[in-house]
Image: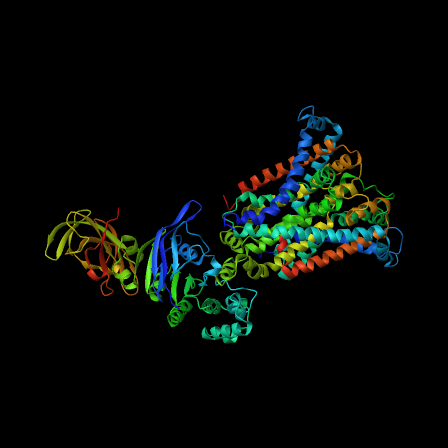
Amino acid sequence: MTVSLTLDNVSAHYGSTKVLEDLSLHVGEGELVSLLGSSGCGKTTTLRLVAGFLQPTAGTIRLGERDLTRLPAHARNIGLVFQTYALFPHLSVRDNVAFGLKQRGVGRRERIRRADDMIARVGLEALADRHPANLSGGQRQRVALARALVIEPPLLMFDEPLSNLDAKLRVDMRVEIRRLQQANGTTAVYVTHDQEEAFSISDRVAIMNAGRIMQLDTPEVLYSKPANAFVADFVGFENMLKMRVVAEAGDAVRAEMEGGATIDLPKDRFAVPGRDFLLAARPEGLLVVEGAGAGIPARLGLRTYLGRAYQYQCDTPGGTVTANGPLSMPMEQGTPVSLVPQPDQCCLLPVEA
Amino acid sequence: MPRKLRPWLLSAPALLLVLLFLGLPVLSTLATAFGDPKGPLAQYATFFNSRFRMTVLWRTMEVALITTAVSVVVGFITAWVVAQAPARMKSLLIIAAVFPLLTGVVVRSFAWLVILGKNGILNDFLLWIGVISEPLTMLYTKGSVIVAMIYLFVPLMILTLVGVLEGIPQDLTDAAASLGATPAATFRQVILPMAVPGLIVGSVLVFTGSFTSYATPQLLGGERQMMMGTFLYQRAMVTFDWVGASTIAAVMVVVTLTTVAVMSGLARKLNPVAG
Amino acid sequence: MQTRTHPLLVAFSVLVFFFLLSPLVIIVGSALSDTSYLTFPPQGLTLHWFQNIFEISAFRRTMITSFTLAVGGTALSMLIGIPAAYALARYRVEVPRFMGNVFVLPILIPEIVLGFSLMKSLATGMGLPITLSLLVGHALLVLPYCVRVVGASLNNFDFSIEEAAVSLGCTRTKAFFVAVLPNIQAGIIAGFILAFITSLNDVSVSIFLTGPGVSTLPIQLLAHMEQFFDPTIASVSVLLMFVTVAVMAIVERTLGLTFLTK
């Protein structure tokens, strides 16, 4: 059974502080959508609203045709995987996995059979009689996953499920999670603060800030075409330079930056004559060329070694920017250079009010 | 049940028990003390003008303060040794401190009757080694009450301070040593300041405990060394002077609460972590 | 900490522990003495005085009263203390600060004042039977222990375990019983047993609420001591020390005795 999840203009408060504002979100059937953001952005609140642990002050939450908004948490039938795993310490692995089936009135025989099946699917058949205290982090994670999956929920939700694992295991487990989710075709919501994790696992990612979704799109679009300065900064466009179009010629515009230097850029919907816009660039999107040239005039500052490149702090008339230079040609502090924007590693953004 | 009301409904029975059966009766006692027809402070005037009552109050203060001071010193040194003992030894010592703590006040005070009596062990011993030729009168003196009180409260102080001293991370003392502090300097400048809140908590427990005690002064002090607790009981149950007893109760409550308030304020101020 | 301890401090502590334990050893010794007066070291050994406890009906009666009272008062206190401790731990954000302090009040108010006030208001004022007043007094006396010890367990409890149970289909009430309760069992047992011994040993509250006919063991001991000074008191004390040992064993097996240093 696959269904979609829809949040319509949902708001939530903690006391008098607003934590979610008019949030709307649609997760399609069998789709995995991640909610990505730093702590306090509202991603966990959103998950807890859908799970029923919090009540929205406005808006509706629907799972397929079913309105969940006023339904108590225990009646929602949503599979949850918690950050702390939240395994029942007093129950064995088998009883943990069978717990949800027991609540659903499944007979003892049948629920042990189904629990053991699911335990085998996550590769823990040898540990079914152990208690959670005697499992490793990765094994606990698998039990938590099995426990959420065995009730065959129409919706699976993950709350930072990998944050307590070490780096190597995190990569293995996220592949495992994706595999199981796709095999069952279950609709899923995945909350994380780890960009790589979200991008690698999701069909679409919602980047959140201060209780709002800043952009919801596929990882590819988010990575190359952020819609605003917040998302651009989040996905690694470290440099933001404020500019204004002063001339237009064919497919290009001439923009003037603060401090008076000008630069030619390809035309873009945000680069309109007379309006300010932002040039966002990753460090590798600003090519460091020795001497004066077609780019942004700059003077090299501190150099650091990244392994794949050198990184320079560069003083420009518009402020300090970070740019990468080739390993073959280390340059000294104080060298006058020009920084040439590389179109595939830069983007133009509107200036926000 | 609605989420907002849940914590209130869950704690309602306990809140009611405390408010109805502790709050109201104690308030009524205080009201009795203030409710004298001659004016709200008339009872206190009587109390503070009475030579006898003031003697009892000062004696109780004196006993409680000496008990607290001795317990702090003895408790701190012992807790320090316990905290540094190897794990096995440490648990044994903690057991040795918990055992008297969990043994009743009557039993523990009774032990000192056996020790300090006219025909008690201490007199027998002193006579035997020939230090004295006549048994000494040790019971029903201020000293016997103080010794028994110290005996009563040292375990509490030890256990409170062991927890505090164990909570000081070894990294801190190591860091102090690496910066050139001698063990004495580390103790004075790192360990002692960090133990201050615990010392204050322990002192408050011991002071209020000994100030309001009943069984120990009753058994070891008797009529002659009347203290606030025994005085309250005597007024209430022997002479049936409930107004007088209420006044004693009010003085005890005021002293206790003031001590707690002042000392916890001090603890907050001296807390090295909160600044 | 691994700094070396000064031998003088160690010697001092040895004396302190001698001071703490020898009076209890003396009680045990004098309980076994074959004399009609209290003496130590015992002269001749006998268990006669232990037998004597059960022959004196006042001891028999008050022992039963004390145990019943300790179990009943603690049970009552737990029954209302557990939900309160749960509310304090689970709704930490929503619950106002003063609420936690209310449950400390029975510790802040001097016990002897509480006993006197209960006698005045409940037993005399409201005409409540003495046994009922005693029960209320003891429930109040031990409430802070129940709330605090159970609360300590709850503060270590990961409430997402409870939410996991709810997400798997349990109602809130059921989730408490199947997911929370089994995991705070140790705290409840330890709290119960600490409250039990507190109630069993109480003098200051009980002294006002006992009368002819109804008394507790410590009060009876006090009364007995004022008239007789024979080894029976010592043997009752030894009996009470056995209870202490049992209590310590249970606390050690549940939360561990180091819990008492926190």
Q: Position of residue C194 (x, y in %)?
A: 67, 53
Q: How many marks?
A: 0
Query: In front here: B182 or B174?
Result: B174
Residue B211 location (% of width, % of height):
69, 39
Name the colouring of the figure: rainbow
* Residue extending furthest toward the left: A249
Q: Who is closer to the viewer here, A276 or B64?
A: A276
The relative height of residue A185 versus residue C179 in the rendered view (above or below) is below
Q: Quadrant of residue B33?
A: top right
Q: Is residue C59 left or right of residue A347?
A: right
Q: Is residue A7 left or right of residue C189?
A: left
Nearest the viewer among C186 and B167 is C186
Q: In the displayed orientation, state which residue is furthest to the front.
A: A65
Task: Name above or below for residue B50 compared with residue C207.
Answer: above
Does residue C256 appear left or right of residue C59 in this picture?
Answer: left
Q: Is residue C39 visible?
A: no
Residue A139: x and y in percent read 48, 69
Query: Observer-nearest residue: C251 or C260?
Result: C251
Kindly give the residue lying farthest to the top in the view shown.
B38
Please say whether residue A283 is visible from this viewpoint.
yes
Estimate the x, y position of residue A159 in percent, counting from the top left.
42, 60
Q: Residue at x 71, y 47 (%)?
A: C135
